[in-house]
Amino acid sequence: MSAPAPEIRPVPSSGRYANSGSGPALVPLEIGHADYVALTDPDTAFWALVRKDHLAETLAGGPLLESYREKAAEFALELHGLRFELRPSAVYVNPTERCNLNCTYCYIPEGMRRHGEDMSADRLIEALGRLKGYFESVMPEGRKPRAIFHGAEPLMNRKALFAAIDAFHEDYVFGVQTNATLLDEAAIRFLTDRHVSIGLSLDGPLPEVTDATRATWAGKSVHAKVLEAMDRLRGYDSWSVIATCTEKNLDQLVPLVELFHERGVPTCMLNAVRCTLEGARTVRPEDDALARGFVTALDRTHELYRETGRKLVVANFANILLAILAPTARRLMCDISPCGGGRAFFAMAPDGGLFPCSEFIGLDAFRGGSLFEDRIEDVLKTPAFATVTERNVDRFAPCNTCAIRHFCGSPCPAEAHEMNGGMDRVGAFCGFYEEQVRYAMRLIADGKAEDFLWDGWSEGVETTYDLVQ
Amino acid sequence: MQNTTLNLAHDSTVSKTAGERPDQPAVIAVRKRCDADGVGLSHYILMDRKPA
């Protein structure tokens, strides 16, 4: 799956000039700021913000060109390592096919969710044992792999889930993503006592907004139940809430982040709906409308931080900021090409089927093998996985000429394949990603970027380039 | 290169309009690096980074 590392050859020109010969390639990028424009080297994800009245002289020569010329090869290697040399350190485990909800945009086919199978506790424990052996063979000593229970709804198979967590709590960092409807007092006590990271889902500040996309099979609201779970989790340091942004809730994102902040949610995600399956596309928002709603909500989180001193980090946007400021510090691996599916993590279905990512679990063509029958090392090399791990924005239009392709990564391959016709197509929300990057650049220009990131994000992070002049 | 330590919050209170801040740096560029260990996806983020 790996592209060859960039080769450093003797320069055929002096490299004196930007954008010619072997000189630095720096593409101007309009970011919507009154005073600054960005320059990026798309190949290395290097960027600079340049005052508009200094753009010509900056490109003509001087400190930026001189210093970047010295660092370009190092940055190219760093990005190459991030894009092609990672090995899996996490697994997303679906312990059941079943779910008690019927959300409009779910990427698990309805038949599975309605009539599917559970893993037995013994089978799930066997699976985690096999996975542990694999991770020990590829991960550095002392680092624990992550195992995230996902769905369908993992708490539909609570007995097996909790047995597995108890059996392996020393061996994995665990997480659970749940719709929260089964997250009662006892479940929360069990999970928080073992410091399991808990993710919930809520799409609106009011029942009628949440109900538009998330409800039981009988159409009953689950909004109140999620709020109850949020109240129980208040004060716990390892939980988050995902809101899926659709055309049904774009005008509600501001009150939604207000609700999250008021209820002490430490981190949320405001994710554009994944359009892999047909149902999700029925509520797909337009890029521009999504960008407007999203940025307005981000602005509101910033106001709330200024008013209260307490952040509500919007993790998917924080990840875009990190992709710009510190590419290797990304927490999410969707917004990079190749994405993390099948290389930083993979997913396991309840029957042991292995897929590059949860998003592919409903798509048989992307089943690379079985945990119980095949070697994981071999599964990672199958065409089912390679189709995803070899999706490379350097190789298809319009991404291959895009100045921000390594801040965005053109997610998601499942969407590109199912909705847009192939792995060599863009994902569902190209325009939305453009606007996110432009907004992130404006925040950096205005000195506000830190306000949108986790405190302590830069611990263990070294500065490799720093020019402010 | 005149390096200074970039404060990512160098001035977060002033609204920016063209020509309002003659003291703005002409160039801002920064890059940081760490060992890569991100494993999140859009359906989940492991909360191993703490908010304020």
Image (cartoon, rainbow, N blue to C red):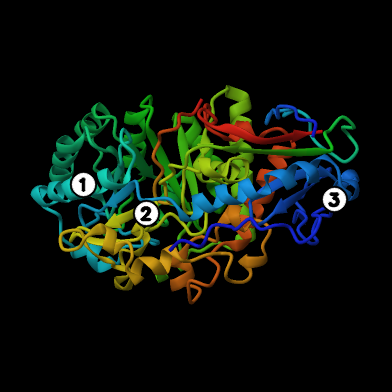
Tag 1 or tag 3, which sits nearer the N-term? 3
Circle 1: residue type: Gly
Residue that label 3 marks = A59
Which chain is mark 2 on?
Answer: A
Circle 2: residue type: Arg
Residue that label 2 marks = A214
Q: Quadrant of residue A238?
A: top left
Residue sitting at the far bottom = A421
Q: Considering depth in this image, is A131 or A296 the residue closer to the camera?
A: A131
Instruction: Look at 48% across and 63% down and name the residue there.
Output: A283
A170 above or below A255? above
Q: Are marks 2 and 3 on the same chain?
A: yes
Q: Badge 1: how crowded within 10 Å, few (<14), some, or many (20+)?
A: few
* Left or right: where A361 falls relative to A243: left
Which disc is residue A211 wearing? none
Tag 3 or tag 2, which sits nearer the N-term? 3
Tag 1 or tag 2, which sits nearer the N-term? 1
Instruction: Look at 47% across and 42% down and name the residue there.
Output: B36
Residue A327 placement (x, y as % from top left): 56, 45
Q: Is residue A266 visible?
A: yes
* Left or right: where A40 falls relative to A80: right
Give the SS element for disc 3.
Answer: helix
Circle 3: residue type: Leu
Q: Badge 2: how crowded within 10 Å, few (<14), some, or many (20+)?
A: many
* Left or right: where A407 falls relative to B47: right
Q: Is residue A280 visible?
A: no
Q: Badge 3: how crowded within 10 Å, few (<14), some, or many (20+)?
A: some
Residue A67 placement (x, y as % from top left): 75, 41
A212 above or below A300? below
Which chain is mark 1 on?
Answer: A
Residue that label 1 marks = A133
